[in-house]
Image: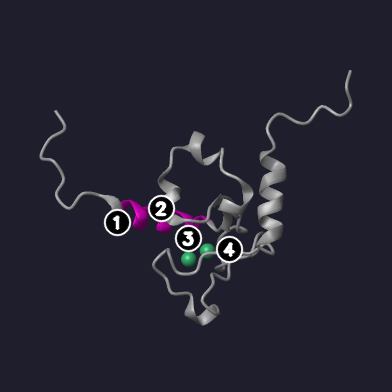
Amino acid sequence: MNERTPPLGDTGGLWQAVLAAAAGRCQCRGTCGKAHDKDGGRCPAGHGGYVRHGTGPVHLLAALANPDALLLPAHRAAALPKRELAAWCPACHDATRRAARQATAPATAPDALF
Ligand SMILES: [Zn+2]
Ligand SMILES: [Zn+2]
């Protein structure tokens, strides 16, 4: 038995480190499409807080800080270092990823895939 065996993966520790660096608050600065200008240009969602009455507490995600990188496959994203990561609330994360995908999509989609 080896007491110093690290846990499988370190996603919990990495998540905590990203959240600590973000002071427990979403780091979106408008890439989701909302300017967040009422909140100093940064999303006000804090981990465990309530954005709106009637919704559950916010669970912030540790995900890539660069919106374009949000399109990376998960196995490549998981290999990136902590400094490439930011805390996101689910709403900003989803909207930012959607916006990034639209920005990189070809102007004209093929008529058929096969
Ligand atoms: Zn947010
Ligand atoms: Zn946002």
Observer-side mark, 1 or 4, equals 1
Give the mark nearest the N terminus, 1 or 2.
Answer: 2
Quadrant of the image for the C terminus?
top left
Callout 1 touching callout 2 (CB < 8 Å) = yes
Whether residue 56 is situated above or below residue 2 in the rendered picture: below
Numbered label attached to residue 68? 2
Q: CA distance from mark 4 to mark 2?
A: 18 Å
Magenta-drawn stretch, dominant element (helix, strand or loop): helix
Q: CA distance from mark 1 to mark 2?
A: 9 Å
Label 3's element?
helix
Give the mark nearest the N terminus, 1 or 3.
Answer: 3
| Label 4 C-beta lies within 8 Å of the nearest ligand 1 atom | yes
Q: Amino acid at mark 4?
A: Cys
Label 2's element?
helix
Callout 4 touching callout 2 (CB < 8 Å) = no
| Label 2 C-beta lies within 8 Å of the nearest ligand 2 atom | no
Where does label 1 land, which residue? 103
Q: Callout 1 environment at 10 Å: few (<14), some (14 to 19), or many (20+)?
A: few
Instruction: Please say whether residue 73 is one of the residues in the magenta stretch.
Output: no
For residue 67, which quarter of the picture?
A: bottom left
Q: Amino acid at mark 3?
A: Cys
Q: CA distance from mark 3 to mark 2?
A: 14 Å
Where does label 3 land, which residue? 92
Where does label 4 land, which residue? 26
Q: Which residues are magenta?
A: 90-101
Q: Which residue shows up at 71% across the image and 50% down it?
A: 16
